[in-house]
Amino acid sequence: MNKVHKEYDLICAGGGIMSATLSLMLKLIDPNIRIIIFERLDQVAQESTKAWNNAGTGHSAFCELNYTPEKEDGSIDISKAVQIFQQFEKSKQFWSYLVKQKLIQDPQSFIHSIPHHAWVEGAKNVEFLKKRFEAMTSKFMFEKMQFSEDHSRLAQWFPLIMKDRKQEEKMAATRMELGTGVNFGALTETYFKILEEQFEVPVWRNHEVEDIDPDGPDEWSAIVKNRDTGEKFYFDAEHIFIGAGGGALPLLQKCEIREKEGYGGFPVSGQWLFCKNREVIEKHHAKVYSKAGVDAPPMSVPHLDARYINGKKELLFGPFAGFSSKFLKQGSLLDLPLSLRFDNLPSMWGVFWHNLPLTKYLIEQVTMDHEDRMEDLRKFVKDARSEDWELKVAGQRVQIIKRDEEEGGVLEFGTDVVHSKDGKITALLGASPGASTAVHIMLEVMQIAFPEKIQTKEFQEKLHKMIPFWNRNVEEHETEFREVQARCSQLLNLAVSH
């Protein structure tokens, strides 16, 4: 074991968008803060952050029907939609600041305007969508949303889906032209370039944080292994952030903090059909989300997506669920069994017992063949040809399992910041909407880990310059927010809704 005679203010485990966002925000506010980042692979942004491994949607709640559930009285709850919208706007504000500071030269290297649609079939679903539209357009941030049941209008919005539709087919859609597609992999690589070149932050690739131990009352030691040579080092730091995607839970379980108890993880792999026919790809310029099937988890909402990956327009449909006991795409099959502990067994069993329909859904998904998946696609694109589409395995997602007094454990589909009482250890668990709301989540981490810094006038002034609405509610400052949003659209070369 080699002692590295250098102490850091912050160690980040994981080279994805979360560690990159946290590190860059902190460095822009305080260039003297000492940060080091470890990534187990030979390149950053290769797991959940990689473009092919996530939905590539700027999640603003424009099209995601699972963010607006129908209540028992028939009304639509849009509170989560309002929340997600505000969180994504913070990301746009931060990116705009980076463009303004010339740290990002070309915003189109990672973000594009792509209209967001929610599309449903059947009288009951059309009624739901209309009620959703009315509830959402009562808020100024969604006032530009359009709704239509007219087939000719829908054909203008997404001709590929409307081809060969009969007039008697009952359907409806909403459209938001402010929607975006984001290549989070390209964005994260840019973040790391800025960190290394502008701020001289060391990023050790092919190095894995294996364990985290207390080192006195105020510090922690990270044991780090060189995956090429097997050599081990340890690094001291006042704060450690675990942003290792699916690898976060096993590392958190090694930390000697009480707050980790009861947490488990359920791995689900995502799969996409991607189109190989350029002619078909050019016929669709939209993100079209529909309703998840019965007993399907929220992350399985089917959607037909136009995306930009490595400068090229692509077309994907999915997601389809797969199962692997790995917590990372390039992880170990032992990840799930090794994550079982006495403290999380009741949670894991409770989730299994109370989610038997989900287990059934996953079994059905795993046993699908290419033609089964094509039949799902043909609900969207009636004349889709099997030879034009190919299956691509996306990233692994580890859904959070938490202790619950009534059910033993509950399965959550969001993200959760788990932290020690003093905030010295912070870990991010969970998945969607993840990358889209990274700036908001990392603001939460900063408030937990660095409360003494974030309370200073200087820190807050810098945060306000970077993210004008970092701690303010959009609804309470409508006029100013409209100005900020228009400025962001201009800096990011995004469409302004009309």
Image: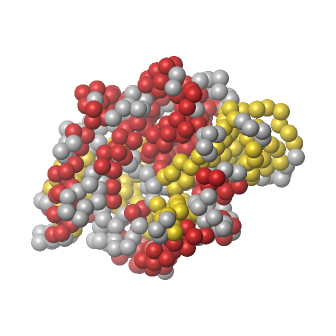
Q: Is residue 229 above or below residue 339?
A: above
Point out residue 418 in the picture as x, y percentages from the top left corner.
56, 49
Point out residue 318 in the picture as x, y percentages from the top left corner.
41, 65
Could one spot residue 284 in this view of the protein? no
Q: Considering depth in this image, is 53 or 135 the residue closer to the camera?
A: 135
Could one spot residue 319 in this view of the protein? yes
Q: Considering depth in this image, is 347 or 194 the residue closer to the camera?
A: 347
Q: Count all numbered tags in the image, as a single digit.
A: 0
**Farthest residue in the top direction?**
458
Point out residue 472 in the picture as x, y percentages from the top left corner.
36, 32
Q: Considering depth in this image, is 182 or 443 the residue closer to the camera?
A: 443
Q: Is residue 308 above or below residue 387?
A: above
Residue drawn at (45%, 59%) of the image: 413
Q: Is residue 21 above or below residue 150?
A: above
Is 274 situated left or right of 346 in this image? Answer: left
Q: Is residue 182 above or below residue 430?
A: above
Point out residue 405 in the picture as x, y percentages from the top left corner.
49, 65
Q: Considering depth in this image, is 24 or 138 the residue closer to the camera?
A: 138
Q: Quadrant of residue 420?
A: top right
Residue drawn at (36%, 64%) of the image: 302
Residue drawn at (55%, 31%) of the image: 451
**Farthest residue in the front direction?**
405
Residue drawn at (51%, 26%) of the image: 455
